[in-house]
Amino acid sequence: MNMTVAPSAPALETRHLTRYFGRADGLAVKLHLAKRQPIIRALDGVDLTIPTGEFVGLVGESGSGKSTLGRIAAGLLAPSTGEVAVFGRSPQGDRSVHRDVQLIFQDPQASLNPRMRVAEAIGEAPLVHGIASRSEIDDYVCAQMRRAGLDPAYRQRFPHQFSGGQRQRISIARALALQPRFLVCDESVASLDVSIQAQILNLFMQLRRELDLTYLFISHDLRVVQHIADRVVIMYLGRIVEDAPAVRFFAHPNHPYTQGLLAEIPDLKQRRRVYAPVKGEIPSPAAPPPGCHFHPRCPAAFDRCRVERPALRAIAPGHRSACHLNDVAAAPARAQTGEIA
Amino acid sequence: MSAPLLDVRNLRTRFRTDRGDLDAVRDVSFTLRAGETLGLVGESGSGKSVTGFSIMGLIDPPGRIVGGEILFRGQDLTRLDEEAMRRLRGNRIAMVFQDPMMTLNPVLRISTQMIETIRAHESVDDATARVRARDLLGAMGIPSPEARLDAYPHQLSGGMRQRVAIAIALINKPDLIIADEPTTALDVSIQAQILAEVQQLTRERGTALLWITHDLSVIAGIADEIAVMYAGRIVEQGSVDAVLDHPSHPYTAGLIGSLPGASAPGSMLVQIPGTTPDMVDPPQGCAFGPRCARRDDACERQPAFTESAHRLRCFHPLSGPASTAEMPA
């Protein structure tokens, strides 16, 4: 892959990205004294490009690999194979990337040091990176807190003295203090009450306009993603199955998994509905089914799906889907235009 | 109409804290008939879960029910001794928690736990109980239920565990199930499966369901009636259509507005300013007042709960039902 450092470099670019968890067989396993550890393919060949300024919603259920992808994008994990570039630079090779991309977690309680005052939590990294000097840091912290909707008067308090929504604002202020260009939000609103969730989502939208940020917004909640994202990427068991501009995605979902997910979103307007859910459980990422990972649960699966992995390919401008059904559908169309199928 | 299965009247549940007494549930009243589903909606600290725990008799001392009645089939549960309550729990009234491990014992096989639940309330032999347990697991959509019976909870996925917990709640064919956010922690596709199965089972058996949740969208799909709680009180209650289509309490309207999906993509969501009140020292009068755009002097007093099909606790409702009178002191 040839990626050059340029201002126009995408915020995130991955090629054939894989990430395995689990160890190679140790001595105990070789001597049959211990069970073999299963290798989990958290990411199984992910190609994704996020141009600067885009707000991408990454949606998947448990075990889909969405958090692993977020962590690799933020430079917290190294890929097993494949390539990753953040603003054209490798997070492993070039540590300067780490300032440009910041991660905001689901649980601010867990991601804030309980013994650190808020001023210290927000101010530590800017000091280390030389963004603000000792004499400037207090003003700098106050500015970050104000921008995240917090009262700077409380900067000498500890995280436990704040409510859940305010704590999430503290993690946002801490992330913004490094002046990142790219925010990776991993279920950042999932544990918040609805009214607080609305406040934080509004803050994300406002910051995007003010700071021209790029977002990788990881969520299991399609309603939130529909509201906030430009583009939606759906993952299932380590692979991207669909990727489309949000408007098109919600109007014309292509992949059977996506269609099932969309049909199941609880909706305020649907009363006394009868749920007809996708059957079966999500298989274990340690033993994914062969071929298309979704085939055991897919109502439209046919022989090819059981053996051959479907390629993620364009079905419309900006819209990618990984489903063999698209080949079946496309074949008569090609015949009409006179192409050789 | 027949007498309601559950009739909660002026329930008040109090906890003791370092800073003084905290009434988590204040003056909550509602009824539930056989086969009916009531959605009890509220945010953290609204008292919705404590209401459920109070009905189940699961308030740990020094927390206690300090006022009101919980009439279940005409019998006041607040006056029952622990032994009588134990006979009801898991038998006539069952509870499903957000975390299935609240129900499941991690060191016992699923079969042991299910058979134990049956035999605690009924004298049947092990083999009969086992067959009933297996059939119910199958009905809950658990594949190869016979094999699952011998599994331990940790060998099952989260969705599977929640199904087992629901199966245990259903096993003695209770008249009332209290479900406290049972699908909140689950993936969307698993959530829909569980909703489908619970719906079917309550329909077939005429079980009444008290569904406690913060998620109005889930409630919209399954409830007949909705009660919205704020700071320990029900502030609005009515049929699912009345409450969701014509929310009258400013808090209900705010909750609906703050849901993504209610407004155009990319637009700013309606925000309810501020945060929930300190329950040890709640605001005078209407607890929502400090966050409410319609607040005026009248709101310094506690609004009464109107007596109508669409009930309300507000002096300045948005539309629909008439405003409330001042509550008698």
Image: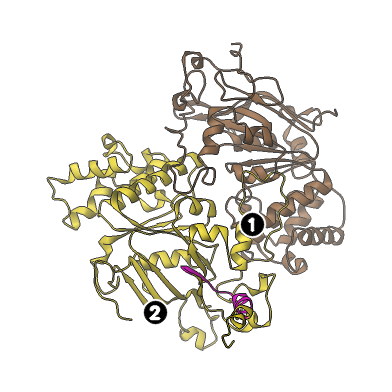
Q: Tell me residue A179's x, y (percent).
A: 25, 54
Observer able to see residue B44: no
Image mark for residue A82: 2
Quarter of the view holding residue A86: bottom left
Q: Which chain is yellow?
A: A
**Which quadrant is the C terminus of chain B positioned in?**
top right
Quarter of the view holding residue A335: bottom right
**Which quadrant is the N terminus of chain B positioned in?**
top right
Image mark for residue B188: none
Q: Tell me residue A186's x, y (percent).
A: 43, 57
Q: Nearer the viewer, residue A128 or A18?
A: A18
Q: Is residue A62 left or right of residue B71?
A: left
Relative to B157, does residue B30 appear above or below in the rendering? Answer: above
Nearest to viewer (mark 2 / mark 1): 1
Q: Which residue is under mark 1?
A: A263
Q: Residues within 10 Å of mark 1 (few under 14, many from 20)?
A: some
Residue placed at 73% from the left, 67% from the top? Answer: B143
| Chain containing mark 1 | A
| Chain containing mark 2 | A
Q: Nearer the viewer, residue B107 or A284?
A: A284
Observer able to see residue A207: yes
Residue placed at 57% from the left, 23% from the top? Answer: B317
Q: Nearer the viewer, residue A301 or A294?
A: A301
